[in-house]
Amino acid sequence: MPSRAPGWLAGPGACRACSIAASGDVGDQHAVRMLSAGPGSGRWGCAGGRGAPARGALVVESPGGRRREALGTPRDPRAGRRPPPQRQLDADKHENDPELEKIRKERNYSWMDIITISKDKLPNYEEKLRMFYEEHLHVDEEIRYILDGSGYFDVRDKDEKWIRIFMEKGDMITLPAGIYHRFTLDEKNYVKAMRLFVGQPVWTAYNRPADHLEARGQYVRFLAQTA
């Protein structure tokens, strides 16, 4: 399979405000906006700058303290930026990073392992890449913390258009239960990621269509409430 999905822009059409490239069918009016926590709110500031993100929100944590959420509403470029939060993850110190431990406690991420996706490290490499790139959803959150390398998560917005999220070292993403998504590597063909889970991991992927699942219904209702 190709390491990149067709139709994605890296130059004109890419959002400079939040460093997320929009697809050709989304253009500049993509549905990802960048949010920063307000002063004293900690790393997990909500849209208003207070508290933790709502369950159902797509959250991306970056080393610079930025948070990006796919809520179906483009960020207004005229809006002022809040100061970035002080808490930052350090991928090089993931084994004893106190900030990672705080996030795990706050979000109840009790289970963890590390996966390396590369031709010489992952058994059945080509088959696994095809599986990761098939559009699917899970009935639980999917949490990935990039320790090295890079890749792309593609997610659907409320209008069923693709949004591409570039993930690199130091980024953490929380994909809500019920969101259609897929993953692919970039031209480096390498990523090392920590997988976090609430309780015992359940790896079942439901390929599209899976609209009959309750997790999908809950996510659709969440999007409708935030539109």
Image (cartoon, rainbow, N blue to C red):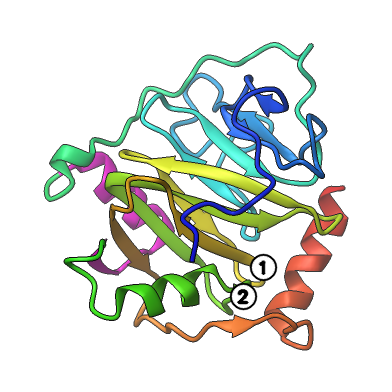
Does residue 142 sit above or below 100 in this rendering? Answer: below
Question: Nearest the camera: 158 or 133?
Answer: 133
Q: As shown in the figure, which amino acid type bears the numbered disc 2?
A: His
* Residue at figure coordinates x 55%, y 47% from the top left: 59
In the picture provided, is 85 more to the left or to the right than 37? Answer: left
Residue bounds of the magenta highlight: 97-116
Q: Residue tagged by mark 2? A: 136
Q: Residue tagged by mark 1? A: 180
Under tag 1, what secondary structure?
A: loop
Residue 4 is situated, as x and y percent measured from the top left of the image, at: 52, 51
Q: Residues within 10 Å of mark 1 (few under 14, many from 20)?
A: many
The Cα atoms of the two marked residues, 2 and 1, are separated by: 5 Å
CB atoms at circles 2 and 1 under 8 Å apart? yes
Residue 151 is situated, as x and y percent measured from the top left of the image, at: 42, 49
Residue 166 is situated, as x and y percent measured from the top left of the image, at: 50, 41
Q: Earlier in the sequence, mark 2 or mark 1?
A: 2
Q: Is residue 115 magenta?
A: yes
